Image: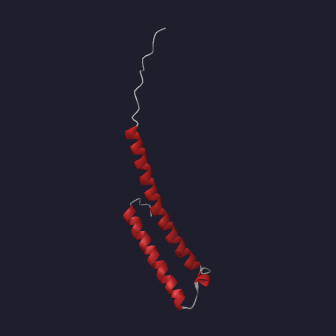
Amino acid sequence: MASKDREIKEQQFDAAKKEFETFAASLKEQGLDDKQSGKNAIYRSLKANVKKARNRIKSIDAAKAHVETIRQKDTKAAPVPKNTTKKAK
C-alpha cells in the first residue's frame, strides 16, 4: 500500500470495509453479539484494517490541504529582495 493516490486508497478502504462487514455478518449468523465479536481476533484485525485505510485517506487529504496552504502563503507574501550591496562607511 505504498500508493499515495486517493482513488486507490478509497478502493482499498472499500475492499477492507466489505471484508469486515461480511465477516461481522457471519459472526452474527453464528449468534454472536457485538461484545462477543470484539473478542474474535480476526474481527479485530479486519476492523483495524478498515481504520488504517480510513486514516490513510485522511492523511492524504491533510497533506494536500497543507500543500495548498503553503502555496497560498507563498503567493500572498512574496519576499522582498534585500539590497545585497554593503554601504561604505
Give residue 12's quadrant in the image.
Answer: bottom left
Q: Is residue 24 left or right of residue 4?
A: right
- Count numbered badges in the picture: 0
Q: Is residue 10 left or right of residue 25?
A: left
Colour option used:
secondary structure
Residue 87: x %, y % from top left: 45, 12
| Image: 73 above or below 56 | above
Q: Nearer the viewer, residue 74 or 29?
A: 74
Residue 75: x %, y % from top left: 37, 40
| Image: 3 above or below 80 | below
Residue 3: x %, y % from top left: 41, 60
Residue located 40% across and 27% down the image: 81
Considering every residue shown, the one lying at the far front of the view is 76
| Image: 30 above or below 78 | below
Residue located 50% across and 83% down the image: 23
Residue located 39% across and 62% down the image: 6
Residue 74: x %, y % from top left: 40, 40
Name the quarter where the N terminus is drawn.
bottom left
